[in-house]
Amino acid sequence: MALDPKRTINELKELRELTSDENGAQRVAWTDTWLNARSWFAEKIRVLPVEHHLDAAGNRWVTLPGNSERALLLGGHLDSVPNGGWLDGSLGALTSLEILRRFAEEYRGNPPVTVRMVDWADEEGARFGRSLLGSSAFAGTHSIAADRVRKDKDGIAMEDALRRCGVEIDRFPEAGQERKHASAYLELHIEQGPVLERMELPLAVVLGTKGVERHTVTFYGEEAHSGSTPMNVRRDALAAAAKLALEIRSIAGKHADAVCTMGSVKTFPGIVTAVVGRCETTLDQRDLDPGVLATMYQEAQEVSRRFAAEEKCTVEWSRIWNIEPVPFHPALIEMCQQAVRETARQAPLLPSGPLHDAAEVARAGIPTVMMFVQSLRGISHNKVEDTSEEHLELAVTALDRLAQKTVSWMEGQAR
Ligand SMILES: [Zn+2]
């Protein structure tokens, strides 16, 4: 039984059949549909010579013991957003399963190193607004106090929803035990953006996940009557904000993969007969290079003050959230390039704009890399999310090649 990428595609379709309705995938973590998906998955592994269990945060670990305790980890997540797609997360989980099968067969259940796969619990944070929940417990970056009190839209507390699925939030730190012997982590994911399709290439090597600076930027001017206030004496907060909204395009444009987004603009009093006295905006800036991110942040602050002055306004910044860029491991990036080249000839290097569980694993100090496969029309978190079957097969094959190279690399390190 060699690697069978077609089986992975069939299993993805089976899962879609089981857990989707006319609006798309409904595998939201800590719901019955998600539990069904997980039971379906548990059936799949029952025939393999593996040990499996749920850790203290609800991550499912499937272990094929090898001659060495040093472990290669492969991962994905079966949970989805509401009305989600058939590939986000599940492609990684089911590809990991197929590679585990291949190792079990090829080495008659006894590979040179231990091979483990993980189905992360609640990557999406769709119900409680807390992404990367299971992987953060694994990495030790969880935030129990803040998470415990989170509620879903029906007022159900996160702590209670988790308990219903057999997970006690206070025991989260115990999930860190799974880090023992972890020597490398690989994750295949759909790109969820349009870059590979525009390049007309199936696969990419992911360099890391971008850091994020996320701020509220508020401009203060003066409310005034829109009929009686001459143009030259106005202190129009929206005018200053509008200049910033345009300027962030050139701030990001100086760097290859940087992005800046003004996603929300609120005006006060927000009526047709008044000059805007206060304008609240949000700014999200991302890049893989911490230096670029810091420069963009500083530049945006400087120009916001200049535009405020030009419009006789003032400006205030307050941070909503930020995270450092998480670069992946150089040796694994190199091997991933080889694996992608051998499978699809060209191996472009891309940063990831979205965060992934892989970022938490890398933050825990475990050598990590991700591979992306092309997303048709760049659409994800939507029922129309899709990737051609030809590309899915290439992706499974390439990740398997990478897994084999990584095992050799781990053996070399042990010597
Ligand atoms: Zn995902």
Image: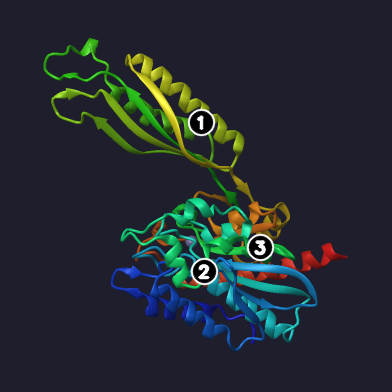
Element type where label 3 sits in the image? strand
Q: Residue 251, position in %: x, y?
A: 47, 30
**Pointer 2 or 3: first along the chain:** 2
Q: Which one is in front in this view, the residue at disc 2 or the one at disc 3?
A: 2
Residue drawn 62% across the image and 72% down it: 117
Instruction: Give the residue type that dot 3 points to.
Output: Tyr
Q: Residue 280, position in %: x, y?
A: 33, 31
Q: In the rendered image of this protein, does residue 300 appear above or below residue 81?
A: above
Q: In the image shown, does 87 or 373 lie closer to the viewer?
A: 87
Q: Which one is in front in this view, the residue at disc 1 or the one at disc 2?
A: 2
- Mark 3 vs ligand 1: CB below 8 Å: no
Residue assigned mark 2: 167
Q: Residue 339, position in %: x, y?
A: 66, 64
Q: In the rendered image of this protein, does residue 333 appear above or below residue 84?
A: above
Residue assigned mark 1: 297
Element type where label 2 sits in the image? loop
Q: Is residue 395 left or right of residue 250?
A: right
Residue drawn 66% across the image and 54% down it: 364
Residue drawn 46% across the image and 27% down it: 300
Identify the disc placed on residue 185: 3
Q: Report how far apart the C-alphas of labels 1 and 3 lie in the structure.
A: 32 Å
